[in-house]
Image (cartoon, helix red, strand yellow):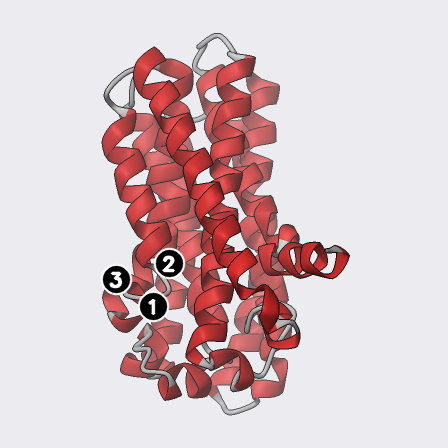
Amino acid sequence: MKTGLLTLWRALRPPFLLLSVVVVLLATALAVWEGHPFNGLHFTLALLGALAAHGAVNLLNEYEDWRSGLDSLTKRTPFSGGSGALQQHPEYAGLVQAAAFFLLGVVFAIGVYFYLYVGMGIVPIGLVGLGLVVLYTSTLTRHPWLCLIAAGLAFGPLMVLGTYYVLTGQISQRAVVVSLIPFFLVNNLLLLNQIPDMAADRQVGRRTFPIVMGLPLTLQVFDFFLLGAYGVLVLLVASAMLPTLALLGLMTLIFALPMLLALRWVRAGRTSVLPRALALNVVINLLTPLLIAVALWWAA
């Protein structure tokens, strides 16, 4: 039993769940800065729902990677290629799959609560989110353009607007624009992580963006998304939709610049520097929304 729980814990990939935490904090900080009263219960349930959805997609991804044989083909990095937990203990595949569906049940139950006590607006957000969780690994990874934006859609508009809605009872234009920041960043997170997996993914029939479009175009899109994330932040402040203090999020440029330099070497064929770029990309994804959230809380 202890081995089974450890396998489940590894397949859950807890360090990656931090992304859900910072995105929920961003949406919450925005609501508080706008003057909406803080609802501790709704915040807790929104955070639990986000973590459960993220955990479910991680577990389903681990299960599908094991079932398809991808686990045995992938060269792992600390940021891509899965945990390998089921490759070592395949006898717990059923446990991992069951845990994923349990977490989806948690997400559904929380969604029902918000439907009853906040309003109908959570329903389309929740249904699209559940669809992305269930279909991402098995279906969306075979469609390059959907695969390109699915993760960003989940952690950007869906998670930000879902959290904002259950805290405020509405969706504002400002919240929609703010949600584009994690949309662009998380698209890049998955996009870059797919590069080391290209050969293995191709063998199991996946058609991710890097596989179909090639490395040069992939890195151009990466640059565009990165510019989009920082550009949206600057435009929000310039148009007075966010306080000047929110420019604190630009501090992550100190990580973005060496990351872009490393990717220039990757373009030139020096793939040995790719893990450095992957690590910096993770830092940017976590710190940028967190710094903006801190700024909004401070300015509230």
Q: Is residue 51 visible?
A: yes
**Quadrant in which residue 13 is drawn:** bottom right
Coordinates of residue 121 in the picture (x, y in percent): 25, 23
In the rendered image of this protein, does residue 71 appear above or below residue 12?
A: below
As drawn, the label of residue 146 is 3
* Front position in the image: 11 or 19: 11
Q: Is residue 152 left or right of residue 40?
A: left
User: For mark 2, what is the residue?
Assistant: 225
Identify the mark nearer the N-term, 2 or 3: 3
User: For mark 1, what is the residue?
Assistant: 221
As drawn, the label of residue 37 is none
The residues bearing labels 2 and 1 have C-alpha atoms spaced at a distance of 6 Å
Q: Residue at x 63, y 56 (%)?
A: 8
Q: Amino acid at mark 2?
A: Phe
User: Mark 1 packing: few (<14 Cα in 10 Å), some, or many (20+)?
Assistant: some
Q: Which type of secondary structure does the marked residue at label 1 adopt? A: helix
Number of the front mark, 1 or 3 = 3
The residues bearing labels 1 and 3 have C-alpha atoms spaced at a distance of 14 Å
Identify the mark nearer the N-term, 1 or 3: 3
In the rendered image of this protein, does residue 244 appear above or below residue 35?
A: below
Q: Which type of secondary structure does the marked residue at label 2 adopt? A: helix
Q: Quadrant of the C terminus?
A: top right
Q: Amino acid at mark 1?
A: Val
Q: Residue at x 45, y 9 (%)?
A: 35
Q: Which type of secondary structure does the marked residue at label 3 adopt? A: helix
* Front position in the image: 158 or 138: 138
The residues bearing labels 2 and 3 have C-alpha atoms spaced at a distance of 15 Å
Q: Residue at x 26, y 29 (%)?
A: 123
Q: Are marks 1 and 3 in contact (CB under 8 Å)?
A: no
Coordinates of residue 220 in the picture (x, y in percent): 35, 72
Q: Amino acid at mark 3?
A: Leu
User: Mark 2 packing: few (<14 Cα in 10 Å), some, or many (20+)?
Assistant: many
